[in-house]
Image (cartoon, grey):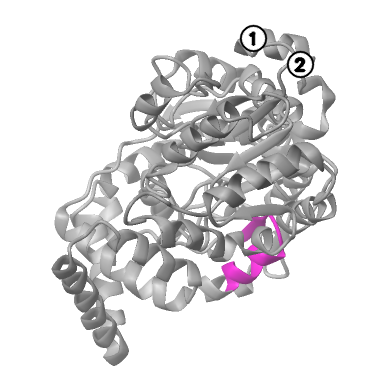
């Protein structure tokens, strides 16, 4: 009997790390014929995917009209009400941060009007309208034709919240194709917009994510939901991914004998003033306020434009910049290689103290048991970003980290320098809190999450994902709207 054709959209470089570099794709290929829909063209990556047993096609770039976008924005307002997460109000304040008073007022008033309409039955109309426009005001019919040719028996996705995958998942759901999702990151339920499909199986990082999922998507309560951990962290338990310190320093141009502070830059919209914090850390080293004459190893976020950092980088005296983005690649879309993982793991391992602003990097660093420092302030005149900096640590997905006792959160510049200094002088002070971070966010501390995902996908393909689950049927085609036959 032929293997079921398992459709897997691959939209961003982080999915390459999760799917290909963990060897998850090869494990999946033992039980299914992976059919990759790649969102960009990369001959080398395509060859690797094929070598791992996949059939590779290209994801159709999504297209939609402004009218459709407007309806989706209405649904996101409705979705926010249902999720009822503290993260959304924090994000709203951050979105309003750089808007004028009248723009903020108009925006809030418009949302209140939408909420009032939803309360008196408007939600049903909006959902119905969106379902109609999906076929007439997007390129869903084109996507449908591609899927008709590919004839998937099941779907596995890591990023169902991305615009690039929306039409693929919607059409597959309407066709009755069984679907499984392994949510890529622990913030993707409470910080992303509406996911319009229900999956037969959900694979999550931790118990907090399960609670968030069931609150945000009541339809998921009748489906299989499993906690599997985070495969992209499995590498940190494998010593073969670590360079020796001499090699690491040589490859990054880090001077011998000087201890290293790793500064992980975030995404620009979260903390636009972040370059100032890097400058302040450099100034503290210059003033001998941190022992050992350390050097700062700065890594910008892989999808954050470097332009906002360039002025500070030209002024600092103790910073060595490490660009994690491959040259010539589209931001966020590159072939994440083993060497890139080795470089990151080695940076985390050999650096003495880690600094980041409410980033997932605090989890990476906690796994390596390095002191974690989280700046939560803006002391520039006016402090435009002070409140939003502090609130980053009170987003729902981040609360287990904030409350763990393993992250030294600094509310001002003085506390920031003191926390970094303490990381050098008392490296084991918050060790139990760091272990708590790993337990709360990753659930498992064994480097075996890839195997758990592979076993869960195998069970899904065999129809063992729940009491009412059915194994994917070859050529499954059900509930097809009339538009698909046009």
- Marks 2 and 1 in Cβ contact (< 8 Å): yes
Q: Secondary structure at mark 1?
A: helix
Q: Nearer the viewer, residue 248 or 416?
A: 416
**Residue position marked by numbered label 1 in the rendering:** 251
- 155 shown above or below 19: below
Callout 1 environment at 10 Å: few (<14), some (14 to 19), or many (20+)? few
Q: Nearer the viewer, residue 444 or 281?
A: 281
Q: Is residue 213 magenta?
A: yes
Q: Tell me the magenta residue range.
A: 200-214
Q: Is residue 147 visible?
A: yes
| Residue 226 falls left or right of residue 306 | right
| Residue 105 falls left or right of residue 198 | left
Q: Position of residue 340 (x, y in %)?
A: 61, 21
Give whichever of discs 2 and 1 has the lower sequence position.
2
- 290 shown above or below 482: above
Label 2, label 1: how far apart the Cα atoms are = 10 Å
Q: Which mark is residue 335?
A: none
Q: Position of residue 187 (x, y in %)?
A: 55, 56
Instruction: Tell me where residue 308 sits by quadrant.
Output: top left
Callout 2 environment at 10 Å: few (<14), some (14 to 19), or many (20+)? some
Q: Residue at coordinates 40% horizontally, 71% vertically from top-left?
A: 79
- Quarter of the image with the N terminus in it: top right
**Residue position marked by numbered label 2 in the rendering:** 243
Q: Nearer the viewer, residue 53 or 399?
A: 399
- 445 shown above or below 49: below
Q: Residue at coordinates 77% horizontally, 33% vertically from top-left?
A: 236
């Amino acid at each position: 009997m032929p293997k079921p054709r398992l459709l897997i959209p691959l939209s961003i470089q982080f999915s390459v790390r999760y799917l290909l570099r963990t060897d998850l794709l090869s494990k999946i290929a033992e039980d299914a014929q992976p059919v990759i829909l790649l969102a960009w063209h990369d001959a080398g990556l395509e060859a690797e995917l094929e070598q791992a047993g996949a059939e590779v096609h290209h994801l159709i770039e999504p297209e939609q009209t402004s009218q459709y976008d407007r309806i989706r924005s209405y649904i996101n307002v409705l979705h926010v009400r249902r999720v009822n997460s503290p993260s959304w109000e924090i994000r709203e304040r951050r979105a309003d941060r750089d808007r004028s008073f009248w723009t903020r007022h108009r925006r809030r008033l418009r949302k209140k009007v939408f909420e009032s309409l939803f309360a008196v039955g408007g939600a049903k109309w909006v959902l119905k309208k969106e379902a109609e426009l999906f076929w007439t005001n997007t390129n869903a019919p084109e996507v449908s034709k591609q899927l008709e040719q590919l004839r998937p028996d099941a779907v596995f996705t890591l990023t169902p919240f991305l615009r690039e995958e929306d039409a693929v998942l919607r059409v597959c759901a309407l066709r009755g194709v069984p679907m499984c999702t392994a949510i890529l990151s622990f913030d993707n339920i409470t910080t992303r917009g509406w996911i319009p499909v229900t999956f037969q199986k959900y694979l999550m990082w931790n118990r907090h994510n399960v609670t968030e999922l069931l609150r945000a998507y009541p339809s998921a309560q009748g489906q299989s939901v499993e906690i599997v951990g985070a495969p992209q962290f499995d590498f940190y338990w494998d010593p073969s991914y670590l360079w020796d310190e001499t090699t690491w320093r040589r490859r990054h141009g880090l001077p011998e004998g000087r201890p290293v502070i790793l500064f992980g830059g975030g995404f620009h919209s979260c903390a636009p003033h972040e370059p100032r914090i890097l400058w302040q850390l450099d100034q503290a080293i210059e003033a001998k306020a941190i022992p050992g004459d350390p050097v700062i190893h700065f890594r910008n976020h892989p999808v954050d434009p470097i332009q906002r950092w360039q002025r500070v980088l030209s002024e600092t005296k103790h910073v060595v910049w490490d660009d994690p983005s491959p040259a010539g690649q589209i931001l966020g879309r590159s072939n994440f290689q083993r060497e890139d993982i080795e470089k990151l793991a080695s940076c985390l391992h050999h650096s003495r103290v880690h600094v980041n602003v409410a980033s997932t990097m605090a989890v990476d660093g906690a796994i390596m048991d390095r002191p974690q420092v989280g700046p939560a302030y803006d002391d520039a005149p006016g402090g435009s970003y002070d409140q939003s900096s502090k609130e980053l640590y009170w987003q729902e997905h981040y609360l287990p980290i904030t409350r763990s006792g393993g992250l030294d959160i600094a509310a001002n510049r003085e506390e920031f320098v003191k926390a970094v200094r303490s990381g050098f002088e008392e490296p084991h002070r918050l060790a139990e809190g760091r272990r708590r971070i790993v337990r709360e966010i990753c659930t498992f501390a064994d480097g075996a999450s890839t195997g758990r995902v592979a076993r869960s996908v195998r069970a899904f393909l065999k129809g063992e994902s729940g009491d009412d689950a059915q194994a994917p049927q070859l050529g499954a085609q059900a509930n097809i709207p009339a538009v698909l036959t046009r």
